[in-house]
Structures are given as C-alpha cells and as structure tokens.
C-alpha cells in the first residue's frame, strides 16, 4: 500500500542541495573538492546585527510574536521599502515569514486552486516550479537564453496569459542568471499585466542590494500593477543572514491578510530574536554593508576573465547577484571519457567527479543547457576552480 501522498511524490529534491551534499560526501572521503553550489554569502553576519540578537535574548524576547511579525519590524520594512524602492506599504500589508521561501509559499497558497497556471520565465530559481506543484498549480515556462540576457519580453508574456493564469513569478535580480529587468523592461511587462486583473505578480527581490550597476527597480513601483503585486524580500543575501530565516512579503491588504491566515496555521511567527536583529539591520544605512557587495563585484570580474577562457562555455557578464550561468550546450549530446552527457545535470556531475568542482546543473532551473556557479567563495578557490575546469575541458577541444 502506498502511504505517501500524490502531492509529495510529484515533488523533486532541490538539485542545489543534491550537488552540495555530493560535494560534502566527496570532501569527507578525502577528495579536495571546491564547492560552488550553494547560493549563500560567505561573510559573517555584521557585528551590530549579532549584538541586536544578543540584546533580544537578554531582554527576554523568547515568547511568540504576532503571526505577521513584530509591529516594529513591519514598520522597519515599510520604511526600507520607502527609502530604497519608493514604495508605500503599511505594516498591515506586510507578513514576516520563516525566510523568503515561506513568503512565496504563503502567496501561492493564498492564490492557487488546483489546475491554476503560474507563468515562470526560464531560468527560474529551483524551488519555484516545485512550490507551484505543491500548491496544486501548473507551471507555464517561458524560454529565454544567454542571447537575451535570460529575460522575457512583454510580447512573450502576453501570449502566455490565459483565463487560467493566476500569477507570474520571477526574481529580479535573477537567481540563477545574475541578470535583472531594467525600469523600461519592467514598465513594458507592467503594461501587459495591468490588462489582466486576475493575474498577480510575485516579484522576488531577495538579491536587490547585490546589483553592480544601478538601483534595482521593483515592478510594484508602477501604479497600474501595485494592487496586483506581491513583493518578496528578506535578510539572507544582503545581510548574510541565511540561517536566521527571516523573509517577508509586501502585498495588497487582501493578500497580506490571507498570507497571515495561512502562516497562522503553519508556523505562526518567525524566530523572535532574528526578528529583533532584523530591525537593526534594516534601520542601518545600506552603505554600512557595502563591503560585501564590493567583494562580490571583485570576484565576479575575476571569474569572468577566467571563465571566458574555458572552451565551449558561452557566458554573459552577470550584472547582479553572485552567480554565473554559462551555456554549455557545446558538450550536451557528447560522450566525455566514457560519460554520456545528456543534459547539463550530467555535465555538472562530470565536472564534480573529474575536476572536483561542484556546480549545479540547469535542468531544475528550467534551462537544461546551462550550469550555475556561485562565486560566493574565496578568490583563491575561484581561481583554482576555473583552472581545474579549463584543464579538464581542454582535453576535449
């Protein structure tokens, strides 16, 4: 007798963690592996944020918080959204969650009935499609490539919207491509979405501050879609607080209340000490944490110079986040040292087993011709990783 639900059996495992775990196992067996798999800043949490958490413990913030988060934190988020994004949100429109991942799930759970469609521009973060499945929805993929900087057009979006479309879900800046939508590109998408009031935009902006060219634009800045937009953000990337698990959504009031209702039956409020520390993080001038962004940019430039020399890689310079997403279709369909490369997941495993460099195949990102490298690692490791890959692939070209 099958005991597991159809829902859980439809889900896949995160390829990011599959490759990360494989790299850890190889390291534990004594193999010198350089893992560039996880999307996690390699910096420590800034001292003022840590001190705020210690203070919260000493002040006995050890009891349940309100389900959508402490009012002071929601006020700090509202202030941040005004300061950094020129967005007006009241605390009642904000729901603080256990990471941005839960914030997205809350919104999807509030919106989707079985069979509803969610448009996902490819490439997308590995969990998006699985989240849609979990909530009974159907993902509609819109293809892109490195030629278009991995971005869809307004025409593509309009062609994809149907009566069954409930949401459009994307990240800008994008994990995994490192690209972002410009003001004019978002404006053209907003004009399309505004025609369809039954469609909600879920805008994942978790990499907002890691942008090397300009200030990131939120699609919620366009008045015609403000009431149709759920902004997702959190503390993980800009503040190196991945393990603290604080994310949030900012939505129209009706949707924010629905998210609170769902979260109240799932996890209730997020970790109280992490919430108090997040207040300090958000109230600090962003320039205080710019040293992390500067380091990422230096590493990006280093890797770009090296990765361009790897045979068979087609790559664009990422403008944000901390990933490279090269097209490796040159190798797909080939057999390398007896290993058949059917897609980029096979190629990523080939690199791990033969160059001892961990990356993530693009199949679960919706781009089976690409692989993702995180450059949230030391310059020494990045140089050595690119050298190993080039030395390995030189043999096949």
Image (spheres, rainbow, N blue to C red):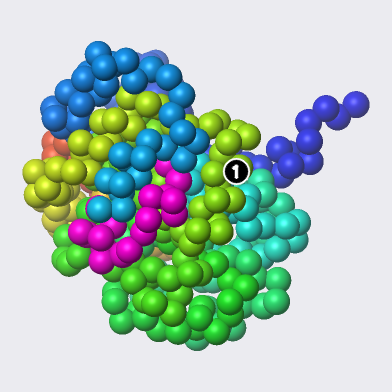
Q: Which residues are magenta?
A: 80-96
Quarter of the image with the C terminus is: bottom left
Image position, residue 49 (x, y; %): 19, 30
Image position, residue 221 (x, y; %): 34, 71
For residue 95: magenta?
yes
Judging depth in this view, the residue of 310 and 233 nearest the camera is 233
Left or right: 246 as drawn, with respect to 109: left
Residue 235: quadrant of the picture = top left
Label 1 crowd (10 A; few <14 / some 14-19 / many >=20): some
Please say if 270 is above or below 304. above
Please say if 59 is above or below 87. above
Please say if 35 is above or below 370. above
Image position, residue 18 (x, y; %): 50, 34
Residue 262: quadrant of the picture = top right
Residue 295: quadrant of the picture = top left
Quarter of the image with the N terminus is: top right
| Residue 232 can be seen, yes or no | no
Which residue, given by chain and number where applicable, does mark 1 sit on? 261
For residue 239: magenta?
no
Judging depth in this view, the residue of 289 and 179 nearest the camera is 289
What residue is shown at x 79% (from left), y 41% (from top)?
Answer: 6
What residue is shown at x 38% (from left), y 36% (from top)?
Answer: 70
User: How many numbered marks are there?
Assistant: 1
Judging depth in this view, the residue of 143 and 200 nearest the camera is 200
Which residue reaches farthest right?
Answer: 1
Image position, residue 194 (x, y; %): 50, 81
Left or right: 216 as drawn, with respect to 114: left
Element at badge 1? helix
Left or right: 187 as drawn, with respect to 138: left
What residue is shown at x 63% (from left), y 58% (from top)?
Answer: 111
């Amino acid at each position: 007798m099958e005991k597991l639900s159809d829902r859980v059996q439809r889900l896949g495992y995160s390829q990011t963690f599959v490759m990360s775990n494989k790299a850890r196992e190889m390291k534990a067996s004594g193999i010198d592996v350089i893992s560039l798999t996880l999307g996690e800043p390699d910096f420590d949490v800034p001292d003022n944020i840590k001190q705020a958490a210690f203070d919260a413990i000493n002040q006995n913030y050890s009891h349940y918080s309100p389900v959508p988060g402490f009012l002071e934190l929601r006020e700090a988020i509202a202030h941040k959204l005004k300061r950094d994004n020129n967005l007006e949100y009241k605390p009642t429109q904000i729901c603080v969650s256990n990471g941005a991942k839960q914030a997205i799930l809350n919104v999807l759970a509030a919106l989707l009935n079985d069979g509803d469609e969610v448009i996902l521009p490819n490439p997308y973060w590995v969990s998006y499609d699985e989240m849609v499945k979990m909530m009974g929805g159907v993902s509609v993929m819109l293809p892109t490539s490195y030629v278009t900087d991995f971005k869809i057009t307004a025409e593509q979006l309009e062609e994809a919207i149907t009566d069954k479309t409930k949401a459009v879900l994307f990240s800008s800046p994008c994990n995994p491509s490192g690209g972002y939508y410009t003001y004019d590109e978002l404006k053209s998408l907003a004009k399309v979405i505004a025609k369809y009031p039954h469609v909600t935009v879920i805008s994942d902006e978790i990499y907002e501050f890691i942008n090397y060219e300009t200030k990131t634009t939120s699609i919620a800045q366009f008045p015609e879609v403000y009431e149709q937009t759920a902004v997702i953000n959190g503390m993980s990337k800009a503040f190196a607080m991945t393990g603290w698990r604080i994310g949030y959504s900012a939505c129209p009031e009706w949707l924010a209340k629905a998210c609170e209702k769902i979260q109240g039956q799932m996890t209730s409020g997020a970790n109280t000490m992490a919430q108090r520390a997040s207040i300090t993080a958000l109230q600090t001038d962003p320039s205080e944490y710019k040293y992390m962004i500067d380091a990422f940019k230096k590493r990006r430039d280093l890797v770009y110079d090296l990765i361009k020399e790897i045979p068979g890689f087609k790559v664009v310079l990422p403008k944000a986040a901390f990933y490279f997403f090269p097209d490796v279709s040159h190798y797909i369909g080939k057999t390398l040292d007896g290993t058949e490369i059917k897609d980029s997941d096979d190629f990523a495993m080939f690199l791990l087993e033969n160059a001892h460099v961990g990356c993530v195949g693009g199949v679960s990102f919706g781009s089976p011709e690409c692989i993702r490298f995180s450059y949230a690692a030391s310059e020494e490791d990045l140089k050595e990783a690119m050298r190993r890959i080039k030395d390995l692939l030189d043999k096949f070209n």
